[in-house]
Image (cartoon, grey):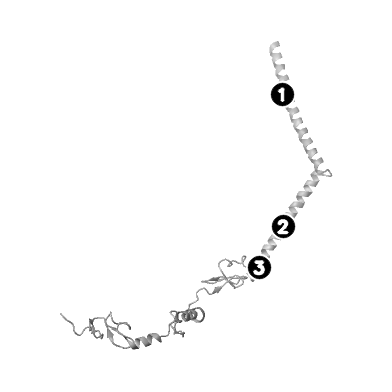
């Protein structure tokens, strides 16, 4: 079963092929089959002129790029690097810390100083925040440290005072010798008490034995 109303014949003289998906030449506007649609295959003079004088188009902004003949690729490359305006910039959040050039996809705004920072410098203590909230915290921490230092100094003075009361006017060596002597004396007294108690118990036991023998 034939469908003569479907498709078109190739306009190439020696072809005349019926193609159900014909391709129209954008230069000469004639219809060709899939084998002869190119400028060269059907010897399209208008297409050759158009191709030779064709202005390259930027693949990003889709705008024509003026160029010298034979330097189309170079012109397009220069256009993309310097003049193309439609490239969407994603990383636009610059870090405000010192010489940091880092850019982030999303902003990290400090709640105190309201400046934007990168992931590395987003914390207030890292970027030396000068905002009112951070300054208040810094002052509070400084006051707490001063109170702690004063309490520590007071304890040290009290400990020194107690040590001086115990030591008196003796030097460290004299105080150490005195402490050793007192410790030895205390141990000697304990041994005497132990020996005396043992002797008394032995004497009492001997007396009881004598009484038992007499009776």
- Residue 169, given in percent of the width and then of the height, sits at 84, 44
Given residues 98 and 44, the one toward you in this image is: 44
- Residue 215, given in percent of the width and then of the height, sits at 69, 11
- Residue 149, given in percent of the width and then of the height, sits at 72, 57
Callout 2: SS:
helix
Which residue is painted at 73% across and 22% down in the image?
199
Examine the rendered structure and indicate whether residue 150 appears above or below residue 103.
above
Relative to 132, 22 lies left or right: left
Q: Residue reaching furthest right?
A: 169
Residue 173 appearing in the image: yes
Distance from disc 1 to disc 2, alpha carbons, whole Å, reads 57 Å
Q: Which mark is residue 198?
A: 1
Which of marks 2 and 1 precedes in the sequence? 2
Given residues 109 and 207, the one toward you in this image is: 109
User: Which of the two marks, 1 or 2, is nearer to us in this view?
Assistant: 2
Distance from disc 3 to disc 1, alpha carbons, whole Å, reads 74 Å
Relative to 54, 114 lies left or right: right
Q: Which residue is mark 2?
A: 149
Residue 215 appearing in the image: no
State which quarter of the image contains the N terminus.
bottom left
Relative to 150, 121 lies left or right: left
User: Which of the two marks, 3 or 1, is nearer to us in this view?
Assistant: 3
Examine the rendered structure and indicate whether residue 48 appears above or below residue 150.
below
Examine the rendered structure and indicate whether residue 206 appears above or below residue 85.
above
- Residue 208, given in percent of the width and then of the height, sits at 70, 17
Which residue is painted at 75% across and 52% down in the image?
156
Q: Residue reaching furthest top?
A: 214
Which residue is painted at 78% across and 38% down in the image?
179
Q: Which residue is mark 3?
A: 136
Given residues 129 and 56, the one toward you in this image is: 56
């Amino acid at each position: 079963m034939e469908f003569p109303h479907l498709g078109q014949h190739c306009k190439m003289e020696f072809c005349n092929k019926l193609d159900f998906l014909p391709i129209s030449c954008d230069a000469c506007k004639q219809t060709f089959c899939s084998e002869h649609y190119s400028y060269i295959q059907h010897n399209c003079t208008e297409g050759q002129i158009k191709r030779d004088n064709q202005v390259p188009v930027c693949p990003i902004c889709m705008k024509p790029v003026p160029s010298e003949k034979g330097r189309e690729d170079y012109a397009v490359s220069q256009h993309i690097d310097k003049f193309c305006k439609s490239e969407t910039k994603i990383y636009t959040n610059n870090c405000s810390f010192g010489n940091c050039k880092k850019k982030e996809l999303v902003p990290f705004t400090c709640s105190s100083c309201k400046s934007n920072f990168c992931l590395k410098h987003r914390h207030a203590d890292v970027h030396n925040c000068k905002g009112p909230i951070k300054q208040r915290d810094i002052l509070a921490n400084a006051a707490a440290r001063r109170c702690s230092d004063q309490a520590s100094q007071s304890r040290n003075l009290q400990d020194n005072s107690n040590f001086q009361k115990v030591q008196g006017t003796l030097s460290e060596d004299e105080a150490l010798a005195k402490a050793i002597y007192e410790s030895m004396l205390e141990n000697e007294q304990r041994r005497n008490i132990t020996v005396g108690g043992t002797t008394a118990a032995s004497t009492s036991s001997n007396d009881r034995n004598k009484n038992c023998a007499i009776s």
